[in-house]
Image (spheres, rainbow, N blue to C red):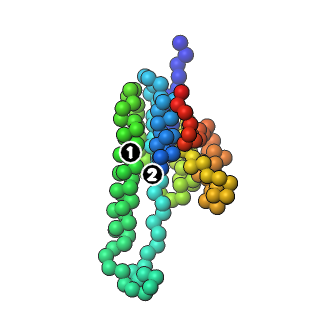
Amino acid sequence: MEETKDRKIVVAVDESEESMKALSWSLDNLFPYGSNNTLILLYVKPPLPVYSSIDAAGFIVTGDPVAALKKYEHELVESVMARSRTVYQDFESDINIERRVGRGDAKEVICNAVQKLKADMLVIGTHDYGFFKRALLGSVSEYCAKRVKCPVIIVKKNAQNN
């Protein structure tokens, strides 16, 4: 009987249905019963904007906008990880799960994390934007597919499970 290598599989997650679809697809297709593969959930927070105590109209802003933003992003991370948990909690097999959170430009953070973690595979959802939207906004999945050294699976939102 051939012994299989335990793999580290990074799944990029965010607030979108597409990322939850990618997570669900990866569980159904990449984590056979009894495998010791490790699922690494990676969420990327956007960089913190620079704030001034004076707003655009010249009024002094009361309160601490940076603290409020940090609280909001903490709640967002918890929300995304909770949504991910609802996807994997009923999975039949016990799997190793790690949660990682990065900050910055999503495409750069994902590529760097895959390299640092020495991941064997990256699974990422796609919004399936048209040509013009993709040209304006860029495509995280396309960027990562061209730059990481491991195999990349891009899960379309209308992909069917086996």
Q: Is residue 2 above or below residue 107?
A: above
Residue found 34% across the figure and 56% down from its top: 75
- The residue tagged 2 is 15
Residue found 56% across the figure and 49% down from its top: 127
Residue found 53% across the figure and 12% down from its top: 1
Residue 46 percent location from the top left of the image: 48, 60
Q: Earlier in the sequence, mark 1 or mark 2?
A: 2
Q: Helix, strand or loop at disc 2?
A: loop
Say what amino acid the circle numbered 2 marks: Glu
Report the side of 124 relative to 135 (left or right): left
Q: For marks 1 and 2, give the CA distance.
A: 9 Å
Q: Helix, strand or loop at disc 1?
A: helix
User: Few, some or many C-alpha atoms within 10 Å of disc 2 (few <14, some 14-19, many ≥20)?
Assistant: some
Say what amino acid the circle numbered 1 marks: Arg
Residue 61 percent location from the top left of the image: 36, 80
The answer to whether one can see residue 8 in this image is no
Residue found 63% across the figure and 45% down from its top: 145
- The residue tagged 1 is 83
Marking on residue 50: none
Q: Quadrant of the C terminus?
A: top right
Report the side of 48 relative to 134 (left or right): left
Report the side of 42 relative to 122 (left or right): left
Whether residues under marks 1 and 2 lie with C-beta atoms below 8 angstroms apart, the answer is: no
